[in-house]
Amino acid sequence: MMRRSRQFPSLMLALFVAFLAWGDARGSQKTSRPTIDPEPPLALTVELVTLQKNAKGGVASLRLTVNAPSSATGVVVTARVPGKLVFSDGSTLKSWYVNLDAAGTASVSTDVIAPDDGKFVVSAEVSGNIQGKSIHRGAALKLLVGVQEPAPKVKDGAIEYAGSQGGGA
């Protein structure tokens, strides 16, 4: 009786090792596929190219880039500037028609004039049709003219951000 009880744990150990080896052999036969992140059908980015600082205010050159992985029709890019900011033609709202009949990227450049120093948010939108479906996307750029963002507080080696006013979600 003593002999059987000693063989049982060794038999279980042998089965466990065989199971692990079988799992490794099965896993090595599978081919791994790369993970592909989904892309939006129409993407818009707004970036600051240059900023010419004057004594008061300045001129910012912006680039609005539209990316479409497939053919898009009727693509219109619209940019809006707040407050005292104006585009180089004096308007606060500008629109451009972008030709994306073939998949790819198109860029539009524009200048924004800031009469005073400050922090401004330039917003942009793109709309168009892809495969008969209407697509609408937006983007924004925080434009700092003659000012800097305050550095975040560091507490115990971590950046500390202010909590939301309403207590969160």
Image: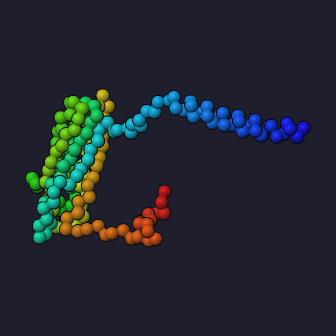
Looking at the picture, tell me which residue is in the foreground, 53 or 13.
13
Position of 150 relative to 5 (above/below): below
Q: Residue at x 44, y 63 (%)?
A: 164
Q: Is residue 142 visible?
A: yes
Looking at the picture, tell me which residue is in the foreground, 131 or 29.
29
Question: Based on the displayed image, in which of its 4 quarters is residue 122 positioned?
Answer: bottom left
Quarter of the image with the N terminus in it: top right
Q: Residue at x 27, y 52 (%)?
A: 140
User: Going by the image, does 76 lie left or right of 6?
Assistant: left
Residue 153 image offset from top left, x and y in percent: 39, 70
Colouring of the image: rainbow
User: Residue at the front extreme?
Assistant: 3
The number of callouts visible is 0
Question: Based on the displayed image, in which of its 4 quarters is residue 43 positioned?
Answer: top left
Residue 109 image offset from top left, x and y in percent: 15, 48
Q: Residue at x 21, y 30 (%)?
A: 102
